């Protein structure tokens, strides 16, 4: 009798299911117990996936936590190009608010902040990841400069930080709802207008 072996597709499917169990468990532990309470041992115990299997895919709890955070945020949207810098920025921030409201991302943010303060390895992973995500916003600003909608801006992050900071301030430190589209539009307009105002004052 010929022994049947799993096909490549079956192995890949099993691998994907195992990975999803690990990441789903990690998201839950981060939301419920914070970064300090999320260990490889606890992830293995709660997910039913052996520690050795987890370590075959990730080198540390920082890497597992980062993978869970990335998955909760979802795929990065294509860079919008409506021909108007304000509208493009608004679309990106609307997607951000939608993700915070409708995915696991919002529930993991407090643990991510905790992790970045406690673990230098995680802080480096998070910094690199968020820097890459912010590339969309930088591209939008640079296009706006190229179209003459904005002046040359020495530090684009100085324009972007107040909006993102206000969003996270509401999420982490107040009971106020996340900003609506009209509020986001007002913040974007203020940031873009102030960029021009700073340029005229220099």
Image (tube, helix red, strand yellow):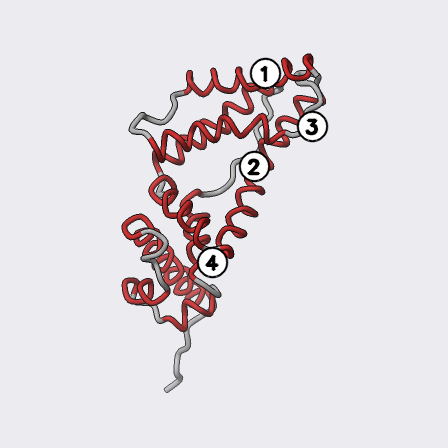
The one nearer the camera, 53 or 175, is 175
Please rate how many residues cluster around mark 1, counting C-alpha atoms within 10 Å: few if below 14, some from 14 to 19, many from 20: few
Q: Tag 4's secondary structure? A: helix
Location of residue 61 in the rendering, given as x and y in whole percent from the top left corner? 42, 61
> Which one is earlier in the sequence, the residue at label 2 or at label 3?
2
Q: Which residue is mark 1?
A: 194
Q: Which residue is mark 4?
A: 63
Q: Tag 3's secondary structure? A: loop
Q: Tag 1's secondary structure? A: helix
Location of residue 38 in the rendering, given as x and y in whole percent from the top left corner? 34, 58
Nearest to viewer (mark 1 / mark 2): 1
Q: Which residue is mark 2?
A: 134
> Which one is earlier in the sequence, the residue at label 3 or at label 4?
4
Q: Which residue is rendered at x = 60% and y = 20% of the image? A: 85
> Disc 1 versus disc 2: distance between alpha carbons?
20 Å
> Disc 3 versus disc 4: distance between alpha carbons?
33 Å
Q: Which residue is mark 3?
A: 154
């Amino acid at each position: 009798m010929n022994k049947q072996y799993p096909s490549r597709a079956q192995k890949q499917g099993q691998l994907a299911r195992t990975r999803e169990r690990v990441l789903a468990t990690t998201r839950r532990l981060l939301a419920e117990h914070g970064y300090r309470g999320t260990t490889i041992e606890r992830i293995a115990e709660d997910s039913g996936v052996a520690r050795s299997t987890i370590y075959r895919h990730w080198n540390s709890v920082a890497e597992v936590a980062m993978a869970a955070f990335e998955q909760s945020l979802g795929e990065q949207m294509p860079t919008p190009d409506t021909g108007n810098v304000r509208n493009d920025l608004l679309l990106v921030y609307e997607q951000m608010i939608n993700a915070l409201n409708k995915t696991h991302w919002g529930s993991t943010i407090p643990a991510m902040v905790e992790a970045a303060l406690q673990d230098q390895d995680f802080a480096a992973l998070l910094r690199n990841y968020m820097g890459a995500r912010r590339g969309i916003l930088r591209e939008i600003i640079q296009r706006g400069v190229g179209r003459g909608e904005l002046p040359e801006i020495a530090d684009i992050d100085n324009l972007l930080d107040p909006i993102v900071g206000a969003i996270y301030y509401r999420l982490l430190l107040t009971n106020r709802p996340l900003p609506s589209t009209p509020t986001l539009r007002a913040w974007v307009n203020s940031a873009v207008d102030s960029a021009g105002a700073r340029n005229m004052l220099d």
